[in-house]
Amino acid sequence: MGLDVRTVMVMFSMLAFMFFCLFELASLRVGSIRGVRQWAIANLCMSLGFSLAYFYGQTTPGHQWAAVVGLTLFAVGTCLQLTGILAFKKQTIPWGILILFVAMTICQGIWFSVINPDTRMRAIVNSLLFFSIYTVCARALLVKIEASQKLAYWFTGASFAALALLMLTRAVLMLLSPDAEVGLHVNTSINTLPFVVASLLEFSVAFGLLLMLNHRLIADVYQMASRDALTGAMNRRRIEEEAVRLRARCIRTGEPLAIMMIDIDFFKSINDRYGHPAGDKVLRAIADIAQKSIRAEDYFARYGGEEFCMLLTSTTESEALDLAERLRLAFAEFTLTLGKEQLNITVSIGVADSSMVGLEFADMVTAADKALYCAKENGRNRVITYSSMGAGTTF
């Protein structure tokens, strides 16, 4: 049984409208994620474009202009898909190039539909234009991305790549078959099959974009659940999870793992004297300095109250001691402005490593906490290592 193009158009138009509703509802719930509204409007444009093509057959008066408007809507929809992808990725949108693409689509549509009607040449030029925009969309998605979102990105990118290949193949077939009858309302294999496949791939693209949104939402929820809302540092639960993973790696590789426990000196008196908003500023300042001082492969967390924890990979106690001393000096040199007053902050730090207490995170925290307590007892604003506690070495 042959495929009827108009039936496919109706089905795709309805599906595109349903995706418009889904993306529009999603955009109302995920206002912080950019690009979703563009995807919604893109599907609405495509739905309207196919509706026009369905209701204005080749025997309907004014069908030439309906073809131009429908084609323009589809071009705008495709451009909006690209702008949504770039906005989703927080990249710059090349508005000039996109406007040029739509303008070229309109001009060739008017020329080959109204001024000098030629459905074959219109089909060839359209195929080449959409080949270019689909290629750009695929290129924007087929990139290196974190594992949690790679499947969604590559699935959508592959769908765009398949669309680009389909458009190029269609243009070549049209060029090689000058006598072929074309047009949206002509049910021939060279015309119908590419159109049906393109409709299915557009459905695949919309599904892929929803998949990208879903993965982003999951990642954002995990981020919120694993970060301290005040300082932006990891929370206690997250660093404990990372410690389990690092323990397995260190057992496998034999690398050392060091830990620092950092406590703000006289933090309670800061809260009592200046109020809790001032204490929050101190916590944020400490976290900001610490996170700028560590390597990308290290981990920093707010462990509780005014206490912070730092895990240092492939690091011995003596190496961690050097970093801890640099941090202590950086904190001591920092001045926080509170109204008309200048506040100097100091910290005490306890350091330990896996060679002394093993790789169990609880044991490492206990050892570093003992060193931290010793630093507090010896006058604060100092670093003490777990291994030096017997000798009482201080800095």
Image: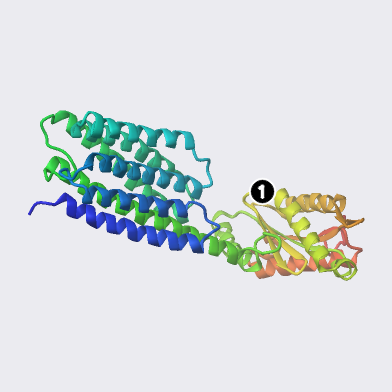
Q: Is residue 386 visible?
A: no
Q: Is residue 239 visible?
A: yes
- Residue 146, percent from left and from top: 49, 51
* On screen, residue 69 above or below 23: above
Q: Which residue is mark 1?
A: 295
* On screen, residue 190 above or below 324: above
- Residue 367, percent from left and from top: 74, 67
Which residue occupies 15% across, 38% down?
Answer: 182
Q: How is the image coloured?
A: rainbow
Q: Which one is in front, 58 or 72?
A: 58
- Give the side of residue 254 with respect to residue 342, left or right: left
Quarter of the figure with the N terminus: bottom left
The three-letter code of the residue at mark 1 reads: Arg
Quarter of the figure with the C terminus: bottom right
Q: Which one is in front, 323 or 166?
A: 166
- Residue 329, percent from left and from top: 84, 50
Say what secondary structure mark 1 lies in.
Answer: loop
- Residue 201, percent from left and from top: 28, 50
Number of marks: 1
Q: Which one is in front, 264 or 135?
A: 135
- Give the side of residue 314 with respect to residue 155, left or right: right
Q: Which one is in front, 71 or 394?
A: 71
Q: Residue furthest left?
A: 1
Q: Residues within 10 Å of mark 1 (few under 14, many from 20)?
A: few
* On screen, residue 379 above or below 135: below
Classify residue 342 by image quadrant. Answer: bottom right
Classify residue 228 by image quadrant. Answer: bottom right
